[in-house]
Image (cartoon, coloured by chain):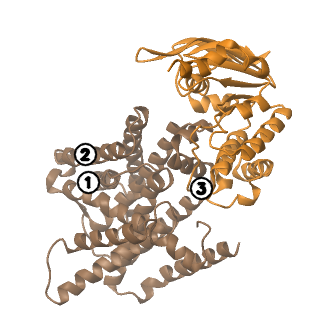
């Protein structure tokens, strides 16, 4: 059964159709990438799944329950964690405190949340930096912190919004390894990504969005050979 | 750990000094110390909203005034003592805070606009109280002053030293409460909201509910300031107690001492009150007495702190004393 099911989702902003009739499924334990050129509507779909705004049409189901229109905190409580494309650390707090805030979602007390947070920081190689203020971290570490905080809430599904953007290839590969391991541990992941290096290495299924519509889906190797996909990525440039 | 132990030692020393102060202080010093504690307490209350949860209130005089009028009104008309009156004061202030919070947070008013809303509420309440004849209107409400040596704690009638100890107990209680809050779930959630509300919400925090809690706790705490004010000064005028300058006086302490810290409001209140009073006295001594000198002085101190110690005096001082780990 699909853990996340998006059914003919539609969203317009002041008459501009951002997403039209988009359907996709993320199976339990799956690792799905949503790709597409800039302005394709990826982030709009992502934001609807994360509760930032409600869809105009269609439904979003999470393990069989409708979640479209819920607030972000309710979505999180339902079991969906997210990261932000532009990282949003709690800059004035320590790295550990950042993650404790997330862990408090499921921990009954602050000491218990601290234990959980320390465990997660260890898994993301941030344990040595736990007492530093989040504002002092480098970009790759901030991205890790973003993931650590989301993981701390104990999600069943992790939504990743361009976590690879701005990372060097080696840093990107390290992140890929982190997500692979998390996925092996049973975490379902839906990622929006521009960095094809990461998509090809990670995703088991790729969904391609163009002008708000899904134009292709399948295994990564198939999708990148799809003529429609090639056209939307390269054709527009060629037309200029 | 050692930083924590040093902080505890400092706290114990401070507590001992404050407890012993009336033994050595004259009437004037005692009144200054009482005022410092009053501002330390009020600043601590304001700090819950701004320092912890990041919600800027520029209208805390509203809660001082409402608390003062609630308890003084009951005492004046029905002879009901302040310890019963405080419950009405808390209820009124919580209701006012909840109304402001609901309006703002429900409709997404934040930042400067939220601050403006708090000013607006304080201002129209000030004008509104001018028209409540039952509470004296613009002519003021007066509580009978009795010269008594024996402290009547039940009715808060007694010598200055009693007021000093009452205010000390309140300030100590506020400190303990804030220390506990900051380490609790609420403290973590508030700081998360302060640092980045969107990220906080994505981590499952119902930001509306926790911001409301911050406002309500801050308002309830500030109602104590009002009740104390009423029984200490024995007179209340809408024009002064609800005035924005009172709100500013409350927030200067924590801003100068260090927003969001536990010692900041205490330190800020002490620095401001002591320096302002000595400067006023000094100028008076050399015959340069003019109104507004205190406000000019506040302005200068604020300017200096913002320029040189943007996080306030306490964080810098704490580093010096080796008390870093935010206490």
One can see residue A98 in this view: yes
Q: Residue B299 carries which label?
A: none
Instruction: Pinpoint the chain carrying mark 2.
Output: B
Direction right: furthest residue? A184
Distance of label 1 from label 3 (alpha carbons)? 35 Å
Distance of label 3 from label 2 (alpha carbons)? 37 Å
| Residue B202 picture location, percent across and down | 60, 36
Chain letter matching colour brown: B
Does B264 sit left or right of A212 as displayed? left
Does A213 sit left or right of B164 as displayed? right
Task: From the image, tell me which residue sits under label 1.
Answer: B242
Q: Pick the residue in front: A150 or B56.
A: A150
Disc 2: CA contacts within 10 A as few (<14), some (14-19) or many (>=20) = some
Disc 3: CA contacts within 10 A as few (<14), some (14-19) or many (>=20) = some
Q: Pick the residue in front: A32 or B254.
A: A32
Does B55 sit left or right of B144 as displayed? right
Q: Do labels 2 and 1 share a chain?
A: yes
Q: Do labels 1 and 3 share a chain?
A: no
Instruction: Pinpoint the chain carrying mark 3.
Output: A
Task: From the image, tell me which residue sits under label 2.
Answer: B125
- Decide: is B228 above or below A23: below
Instruction: Pinpoint the chain carrying mark 1.
Output: B
Distance of label 2 from label 1 (alpha carbons)? 7 Å
Disc 1: CA contacts within 10 A as few (<14), some (14-19) or many (>=20) = many
Q: Are marks 2 and 1 in contact (CB under 8 Å)?
A: yes
């Amino acid at each position: 059964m699909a853990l996340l099911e998006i059914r003919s989702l539609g969203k317009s902003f002041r008459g501009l159709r951002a997403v039209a009739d988009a359907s996709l499924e993320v199976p339990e334990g799956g690792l799905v990438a949503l790709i597409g050129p800039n302005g394709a509507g990826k982030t709009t779909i992502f934001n609807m799944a994360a509760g930032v705004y409600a869809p105009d049409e269609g439904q979003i189901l999470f393990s069989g329950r409708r979640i479209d229109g819920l607030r972000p905190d309710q979505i999180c409580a339902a079991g969906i964690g997210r990261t932000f494309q532009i990282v949003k650390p709690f800059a004035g707090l320590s790295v550990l405190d950042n993650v404790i805030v997330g862990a408090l979602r499921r921990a009954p007390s602050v000491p218990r949340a601290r234990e959980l947070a320390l465990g997660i920081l260890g898994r993301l190689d941030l344990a040595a930096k736990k007492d530093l203020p989040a504002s002092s971290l480098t970009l790759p570490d901030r991205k890790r912190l973003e993931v650590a905080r989301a993981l701390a809430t104990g999600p069943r599904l992790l939504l990743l919004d361009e976590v690879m953007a701005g990372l060097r290839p080696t840093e990107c590969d390290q992140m890929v390894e982190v997500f692979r391991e998390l996925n092996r541990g049973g975490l379902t992941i839906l990622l929006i990504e521009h960095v094809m290096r990461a998509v090809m290495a990670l995703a088991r299924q790729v969904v391609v969005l163009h002008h708000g519509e899904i134009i292709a889906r399948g295994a990564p190797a198939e999708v990148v050979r799809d003529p429609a996909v090639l056209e939307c990525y390269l054709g527009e440039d060629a037309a200029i | 750990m050692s930083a924590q132990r040093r902080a505890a030692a400092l706290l114990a020393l401070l507590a001992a000094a404050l407890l012993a102060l009336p033994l050595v202080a004259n009437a004037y010093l005692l009144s200054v110390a009482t005022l410092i504690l009053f501002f330390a307490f009020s600043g601590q209350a304001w700090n819950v909203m701004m320092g912890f949860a990041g919600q800027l209130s520029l209208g805390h005089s509203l809660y001082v005034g409402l608390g003062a009028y609630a308890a003084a009104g009951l005492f004046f008309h029905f002879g009901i003592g302040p310890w019963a009156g405080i419950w009405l004061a808390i209820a009124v202030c919580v209701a006012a805070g909840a109304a402001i919070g609901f309006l703002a947070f429900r409709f997404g008013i934040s930042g400067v606009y939220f601050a403006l809303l708090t000013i607006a509420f304080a201002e129209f309440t000030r004008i509104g109280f001018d028209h409540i004849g039952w509470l004296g209107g613009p002519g003021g409400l007066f509580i009978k002053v009795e010269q008594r040596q024996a402290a009547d704690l039940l009715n808060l009638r007694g010598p200055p030293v009693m007021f000093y100890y009452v205010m000390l107990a309140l300030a100590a209680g506020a400190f303990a409460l804030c220390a506990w809050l900051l380490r609790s779930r609420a403290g973590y959630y508030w700081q998360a909201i302060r640092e980045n509300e969107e990220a906080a919400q994505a981590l499952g925090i119902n930001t509306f509910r926790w911001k409301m809690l911050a406002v309500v706790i801050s308002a309830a705490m500030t109602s104590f300031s009002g009740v104390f004010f009423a029984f200490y000064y024995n007179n209340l005028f809408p024009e002064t107690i609800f005035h924005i300058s009172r709100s500013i006086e409350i927030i200067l302490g924590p801003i100068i001492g260090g927003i969001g810290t536990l010692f900041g409001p205490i330190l800020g209140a002490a620095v401001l009150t002591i320096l302002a009073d000595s400067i006023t006295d000094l100028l008076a001594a050399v015959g340069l007495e003019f109104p507004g000198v205190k406000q000019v002085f506040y302005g200068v101190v604020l300017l200096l702190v913002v320029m040189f110690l943007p996080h306030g005096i306490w964080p810098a001082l704490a580093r010096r004393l080796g008390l870093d780990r935010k206490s």
